[in-house]
Amino acid sequence: MTHSATMEKVENGSSERLTLDAIVIGAGVAGLYQLYRLREQGLKVKVFETASNVGGTWYWNRYPGARFDSEAYIYQYFFSEDLYKGWSWSERFPAQPEIERWLNYVADRCDLRKDVYFNTTIKSAHFNEGTERWILETDAGLTIDAQFVITCCGMLSAPLTSTFAGQDTFKGQLFHTARWPKEPVDFSGKRVGIIGNGATGIQVIQTIADKVGHLKVFMRTPQYIIAMRNPKYGNEEVAAYKDRFHELAKTLPHTFSGFEYSFENGAWADLLPEQRREILETIWNDGSLKLWLASFSELFYDQSVCDEISEFVREKMRERITDPKLRDLLIPSDYGFGTHRVPLETNYLEAYLQPNVEIVSVKNNPIECVTPEGIKTADGTVHALDIIILATGFDAGSGALTRIDIRGRGARSLKEDWSRDIRTNMGLQIYGYPNLFTTGAPLAPSAALCNMTTCLQQQVDWISNCIKYLHDNNLKVIETTKEAEDQWVKHHDDIANKTLMTKTNSWYMGSNVEGKPRRLLSYIGGVGAYRQKCDEVAAEAYRGFIMS
């Protein structure tokens, strides 16, 4: 194969055509590493990024309080010991500005920026069956001809920004958390309303509660929470985690969630009640996601175990809230702990004890519209506001791809295909879309249930090795078979449907987007098990994929 990257004028010279071996969409955690790996093979590859800089999620989500809920020393690239040890974190769960600086450090240290087109959005990607290559168009009028397309758009990168009628009429300031301005927002003395109290909303609420004049939280579903333990790091702590580089690089890819911890407490039924309680107390005091992702695996599929652990968390929340009315509003009772995304928090519950913070329950009194003055609920009340914050979430997993006009064989539309049924083979390819690889897509752990750097690196490595296999064997096209995709979907669903997650409405199930097909977006069979299955497919000359 001839590796080529050429730019030529087309037609009347008003537009340009770029010819590449591969194009990567997105310059976040996955996109940067994908560029590194393909460039390492000698391929001519470019990254296209809507933002003005690298970072992906950590570029866009600069809202007040945004920070890791993965420990910083595991939310890392492990392909280079020097790269890992060349950066020192200031605390266990750093905030967004530090994370963005780290990703800029990675881009500069690996000299990646020169191959990234910033401020450029891919509008369409059509497979040309005659040439067996992809033709893509950008919002700037650039045409790209590429053999391979790798989407690294992010699983939470399609924000639900136009959620309520009348948003454009609001006279004050309106922000979505995923499109937060770089300039500071002045909250002092302002009447602020925030819609949404998931992981993002919680971070915003606890951060701005003491900075606003008055805060109204429009709350539909209360959340279980875990109190974050976030110690600062000095030289001793930094040296300690850096000494663990080889240990973490070896173990993280094989745990259930891609975190450093796994289920090591034995079977719930084999323990006495006091033993269970001791384990739960110890894990709770760790102040991490360990209670969710590494306490007892039965939490995910045994209703009685889920009920007991849920009550344990409710008890911890009641200790911090004595007001009966607040307890009713803030403590979940109609779904189980761990069946939704579990947020870490710092003094979130205490924010509601402040006299300037108010909960507006919209469960039975939904938001009707936004008016020029504020937010109107179904009972006719208009809540006068100066600032509205939309913490309304994302079209997760699939939205970033369906917002691009992607067309495969026979001009089939991915948006139309996924409007009927969201399907992939291992979250890596989609039947009918040759030479299109996906990361962070549905039906892989990276869609939600994973320490993202662990899973995204694994997918990038698999894709890179697959492309190298094609080149080494003088092959040009790879596409999953329908049978292999069907088998993976069935395997995914068989596991998912045994869990309690599928019985709860959440963005994990696509329930937050009207009309979205209902399916658990993330593979829940475990990160290590998923990796093993991907490795087995590759070892068998990419079983389930047709190559030519």
Image (cartoon, rainbow, N blue to C red):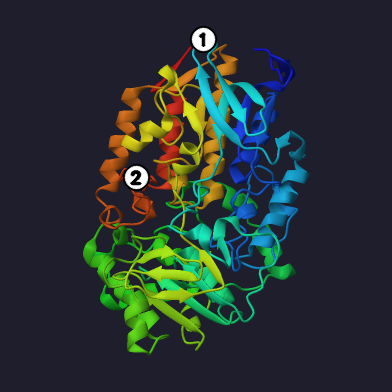
Tell me the residue at 50%/51% (across/down).
Answer: 159
Tell me the residue at 42%/71% (across/down).
Answer: 218
Q: Say which of 347 and 309 sits in front.
A: 347
Quadrant where the N terminus sits is: top right
Query: How many residues crowd around disc 2 within 10 Å: few (fewer than 14), some, or many (20 or more)?
Result: some
Query: Residue 508: horizontal and vertical position, in percent?
Result: 38, 52
Q: Say which of 391 and 34 sits in front.
A: 391
| Lateral position of residue 491 relative to residue 72, left or right | left
Tell me the residue at 59%/55% (across/down).
Answer: 179
Residue identified by numbered label 2: 516
On screen, residue 533 above or below 241: above
Question: In which quadrant of the rendered view does residue 238 lie?
Answer: bottom right
Residue identified by numbered label 1: 130
The span from disc 2 to disc 1 (Cα, nearest Å) is 33 Å
Q: Which mark is residue 457?
A: none
The residue type indicated by label 2 comes to Lys
The residue type indicated by label 1 comes to Gly
